Image (cartoon, grey):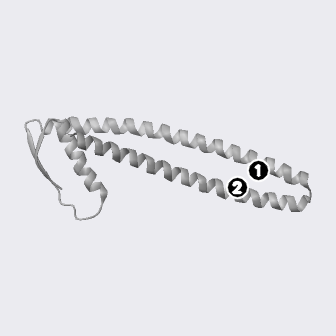
Amino acid sequence: SEYIAVAARIFEERKAKAEEAQRAAKERAELKKKKQEQQTAASSAKGGAGGKDSSAEAEKKRLAKLRAESRKADEAVAKEVAKMSASNKSLEKQREIVKKTLGQLLKPYKRALVFGLIDNENKSEALNSLATLKLLDSLGIQVSWFCA
């Protein structure tokens, strides 16, 4: 059961890191796109005004916009983290309902055979097997045979 707990923890950590990396990459791409648009606008303004003062002002405006966008991105990340916390609470409630329901159904049993026929490369099938082992362990049911 320690192996199951460690494997589940590692999976959750990797999943969270992957999701964070995807969000960060998306935000970087959006910032890069906006920066390019601003540079295009700044160069157009510079060409029209034809002076150093206008280019310095355009640069100040561009930096101010980037700072504002950075703050917005930070706020968006904070909101996503808050949503994840709420989602985790919901998952905990669902987990307890499943554990309670299956605990009542499986109460008379002390041992179990677990098997599954995985015919594809879908990673969720392996996670379902892992979750089954973890649930049975938490219910105090000994797994006599496992094949998945």
N-terminal of the two: label 2 or label 1? 2
Q: Assess disc 2: are there few (<14), some (14-19) or many (≥20) residues with their C-alpha within 10 Å of its C-alpha.
A: some
In the displayed structure image, the side of residue 115 where residue 52 appears, left or right: right
Q: Check disc 2 and report its element: helix, strand or loop.
A: helix
Location of residue 5 by image quarter:
top left
Q: Assess disc 1: are there few (<14), some (14-19) or many (≥20) residues with their C-alpha within 10 Å of its C-alpha.
A: some
* Amino acid on which disc 2 is placed: Lys
Rendered residue at 25%/46% (across/down): 131
Q: Decide: is 62 above or below 5.
A: below
- Which part of the image, by quadrant, shows the C terminus? bottom left
In the rendered image, residue 63, in percent from the top left (x then y), is placed at 75, 47
In the displayed structure image, the side of residue 105 where residue 77 appears, left or right: right
In the rendered image, residue 134, in percent from the top left (x then y), is placed at 22, 42
How many numbered circles are shown? 2
In the rendered image, residue 138, in percent from the top left (x then y), is placed at 20, 36
- Which part of the image, by quadrant, shows the N terminus? top left
Rendered residue at 44%/40% (across/down): 84
In the displayed structure image, the side of residue 78 where residue 64 appears, left or right: right
Rendered residue at 28%/38% (across/down): 95
* Amino acid on which disc 1 is placed: Arg
Q: Are marks 2 and 1 in contact (CB under 8 Å)?
A: yes
Residue identified by numbered label 1: 62
Estimate the spatial distance between the alpha carbons at disc 2 and disc 1, rounded to whole Å.
Answer: 8 Å
Q: Check disc 1 and report its element: helix, strand or loop.
A: helix
Residue identified by numbered label 2: 35
Q: Decide: is 100 above or below 26.
A: above
In the rendered image, residue 61, in percent from the top left (x then y), is placed at 79, 48
Q: Which mark is residue 77?
A: none
